[in-house]
Amino acid sequence: MIKATCMGTNYKGTQNELEECVNDAKDVTYLLKWEGFLTDTYLEEQVSGDKFVIELTKLVDLAVSGDITGAGFSHSGHGTQGVDTEEVDMYREGLYFNDRVVWDDEVAKILSRIPEGFPFFIFLDTCFSGGMMSVKGNPGKPRFVQTEKIPKKFKKKLGFRKAITANAIYIAACSEGEYSYDAVSLGNGAATYYLKTSYSKENTFQEWFNKIKQHLPSSKYPQTPQLICKEEFKDMKAFSSFKPVVSDVPDISPTPNPNPTPVPTAKKNWWKKFVDWLKKIFKAVRITIYKDSGGKFSRFEMYKSIDGQYYFVFKAKNNETVCSSETYTAKQMCRKGIDILKRDIEDAKVMDYTGGV
C-alpha cells in the first residue's frame, strides 16, 4: 500500500488570506490518487500546525513499521522565518499556521526516522525566505508571513532543504531568498500548477523536475523550484517505484492435471455463433443500449480500445459527447477516474484563457 496526505489552507478570514492553496491540495490529491495512493486531504480550518505534525508523524510511523511501501506529503500555505534563541546570530525557517509555526528542526526530527532507501515524496508550496528581495510588478501574492524581524547579520541555521534532503524526495517551490507565488490566473500556486501539468508517469523524478524548470522561474513568477534528494532517487520512476513489486507475490495457481478428462462441449447454435462473431468484430467498442420511461439522460461510458487500453466519455442528454478521458492501463483505474470527476465536478472553477470579454 502507498499512502499520502495533502494539506492546504487559504487562511480565510485573516489578514494573511491567500486564494489558491486549497486548490493546490485538491489537485495534488487528484494526482496522487491517480497513481494509486490512499490519500487523506485536509483543507482550510482542518489545517493547523499540530495537524501537520500529527499527519507527517503518522506517515513516518507507517514507513518504519513496514505497513506501506511508499509515502507522499504535500502542503500549500505561508512560510516564515524566526530567530533561533539557542544559537547566536542564527535564524530558522518555518511553516506558518493560524495556531502556531512548525519550525524546520521539528520537521527534521520527524523525518530522521524514515528508513534508508524508503521512497518518501514531499512537496511544499510555501515561501521560506524573508522580505529582503524586491518584487517587480504584481505577479501574485507571496506566500510568506513575517513573524519575527531577522537582523541582516544573521545566518540561516538549518532550513527545510537540509532538514529534508537526507531522507526524502523533496521538491521545493522556490530557492533561498525567493518568494513562492499564489498565481490566481493559473488557479494554483505557480509551482503546484507546473508540478501537476508537467507530470507523466513515464518520467523519472529528475525528468519531471526538468519539465517544471522549463516554466519556472519566469518573468511573471521569479521563483526557482528545487529538487533535493539522494542521487539514487532522481532516476526512480515517479511513482511506480513506490508500489510493491508484483514479482514478489508468490505463485499460488493450481498445478494443471497432466491427464485431464475431456469435457464434452455442446454444439453451438447459430444464434450463439452470430453473437460471438459480433463480439469479435466490435471488440474495440462497448455499445451502450439504454432505455428509460421515455426520456434521455447524461452518462459516463467506458470503452476498451484495440490496444487494450481503457477510456471513458461523458455524453449529454442529447447523446452528444461532451468530453473524453485519456487512456488507462486498467479498467479499475478508468472507473476511479470517473468517480473522482463525479466527486470534484461541483467545485470546479471556470478559467477563461481566451482573452475575450
Image: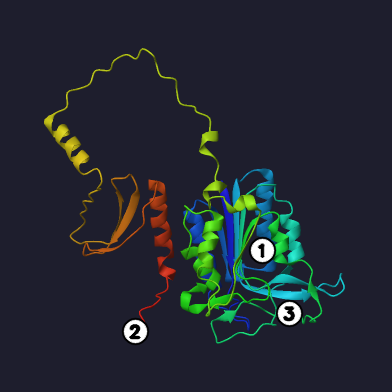
Secondary structure at badge 2 equals loop
Is residue 138 shown left or right of residue 357?
A: right
Task: Mark 3: give few (<14), some (14-19) or many (20+) Cα within 10 Å.
Answer: some
Could you say which disc has been placed on residue 52 in the image? 1
Task: Mark 1: give few (<14), some (14-19) or many (20+) Cα within 10 Å.
Answer: many
Give the Cα separation between the discs numbered 2 and 1: 42 Å
Q: Amino acid at mark 3?
A: Thr
Image quadrant where residue 97 sits: bottom right
Query: Which percent across, then down, holds residue 293?
Result: 20, 58
Q: Nearer the viewer, residue 353 or 267?
A: 353
Identity of the residue drawn at 47% across and 75% down: 186
Identity of the residue drawn at 35% across and 79% down: 354
Image quadrant where residue 174 sits: bottom right
Query: Which percent across, then down, holds residue 55?
Result: 65, 58
Task: For the C terminus, give its image quadrant.
Answer: bottom left
Secondary structure at badge 1 equals helix
Q: Is residue 67 above or below residue 231?
A: above
Could you say which disc has been placed on residue 356 in the image? 2
Q: Is residue 268 above or below residue 76?
A: above
